[in-house]
Image (cartoon, grey):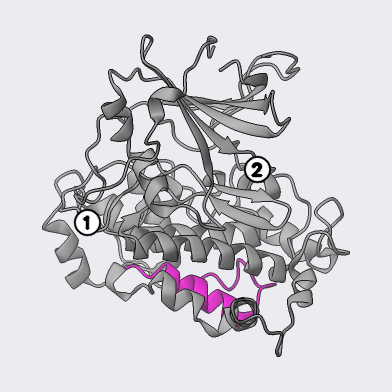
Amino acid sequence: MNKYRLIRKLGEGTFSEVLKAQSVKSGKYVAIKCMKNHFDSIEQVKKLREIQALERLSPHAHIIKLLEVLYDGPTGRLALVFELMEMNMYEAIKGRPHYLPENRVKYYIYQLMKAIDHMHRNGIFHRDIKPENILLLDDTVKLADFGSCRGIYSKPPLTEYISTRWYRAPECLLTDGYYGYKMDIWGVGCVFFEVLSLFPLFPGDNELDQIHKIHNILGTPEQELLDRFQKHATHMEFDFPTKKYVGISRLISHVSKECQELILWMITYNPDDRPSASQIIKHPYFKDLKEIDDNRRSGQVKGVGIDNLSQYSRRNRDNASDGGDSQNSKSFKGSKKNFVKKPHQVNIFPPIKNIKGDKKKGKKKNHHENYQKLKHNSSNHSITGKKIIPTVKKINKFKIRDKLG
């Protein structure tokens, strides 16, 4: 650990704490995720779900890069060294007085969907899609925190309580672990709405309230679908009052109809009817961005040129530090007043007391529900049941010589 100079603590979660550090040799800044669990052997470290997933998925332009694994055998301490990003998606929208331009949000979600598509094609689903796990550096989006991921072909029942409640799909809420990779699509749909509207779509106070909030927007589903879910449910009564479909158009009236329709497709109640990540990328809404991608791959510039990416950037006249899309400010204030009952809370990794010069003190409230009930298994088996090459073949060469705090 003496190869890094610790600067400050960025945050802390149930299973880890994240530190900002600087490489003594290169001067490069990194994020070091220090695991709270102790590991008995290198073999146990290699089985860690997050390491296995990143080995299979990396490198990818929109997935966080794991730079190094630091393991200290005598103490059993483990730290993962990642590239340092600027902020997460929640931090990018909190406190904004005006909406982000739709084109910029479109660009963010397109990049996120490319990460999801790559992940699903490689047999992994994330299970915890939320704004805090979507990171930004300039205009680049990267998906992070693969500690909860599972293999697409894992047999149910899976862990029942996993993704953060506000972004949890109906099949996760209603069944005892009978869900699949389409839950990631639901999560992205909720994030898509939130980044456009600046408030969460389904901010449930508990699981039952979460279901009621979903029904208030999408209506109560057909009895046939509820019966299907009830076959695998023991923890909830299915006596839901009948609610009619309302939709989201009144909540994001400043957004194009095509965008609204795509979000609704992503949050379709029946997971079988939700689109795949590949279908979303090919959707007409993303046609211009896909054309830019295709031109890049072919080395040609046709139609929509690469320079046109400036219209999606936060470095243009709609810089994040200014008022954004000021024409929509009145609309935003109205919808926020009518819909939001309480303010959005903060990151699951809240800033805490000073480590080497950090002046922030005290803890802020958790952004979502706490994760104390989740049990972390540090000796996870291969996430897909298939052989996976260990992330660090020479993992024993990385040693933590200093205390990690």
390 left or right, relative to 318: left
Determine the residue positioned at 35% across, 56% down.
Answer: 169
| Dot 1 amino acid type | Asp
Answer whether labels 2 and 1 touch (C-beta < 8 Å): no
Q: Element under label 2?
A: loop
Three-letter code, disc 2 = Met
| Residue that appears at 24% across and 51% down | 384
Q: Residue, x 36% and y 67% (percent of image)?
A: 243
Label 1: element kind: loop
Name above or below for residue 167 compared with residue 103: above
Q: In which quarter of the image is the N terminus?
A: top right
Please give the label number shown on residue 118.
Answer: none
Which residue, as the protein is rendered here, is positioned at the far left? 231
Q: Considering only order in the chain, which callout, 1 or 2, is on the residue closer to the N terminus?
A: 2
Residue 338 in magenta stretch:
no
Q: What stretch is highlighted in magenta?
A: 248-269
Residue 155 at x, y = what percent?
Answer: 15, 53
Q: Quadrant of residue 329?
A: bottom right
Q: Is residue 312 above or below residue 334?
A: below
Q: Can residue 188 be seen in this view?
A: yes
- Seen from the viewer's position, the closer of residues 121 and 215 is 121
Percent position of residue 351, x then y: 64, 25
Q: Is residue 11 above or below residue 346?
A: above
Residue pictured at 31% horizontal, 45% vertical: 389
**Mark 1, residue position:** 239
The residue singled out by tag 2 in the image is 85
- Nearest the viewer among 326 and 62 is 62
Instruction: Answer with the quarter of the image where residue 397 lies.
Output: top left
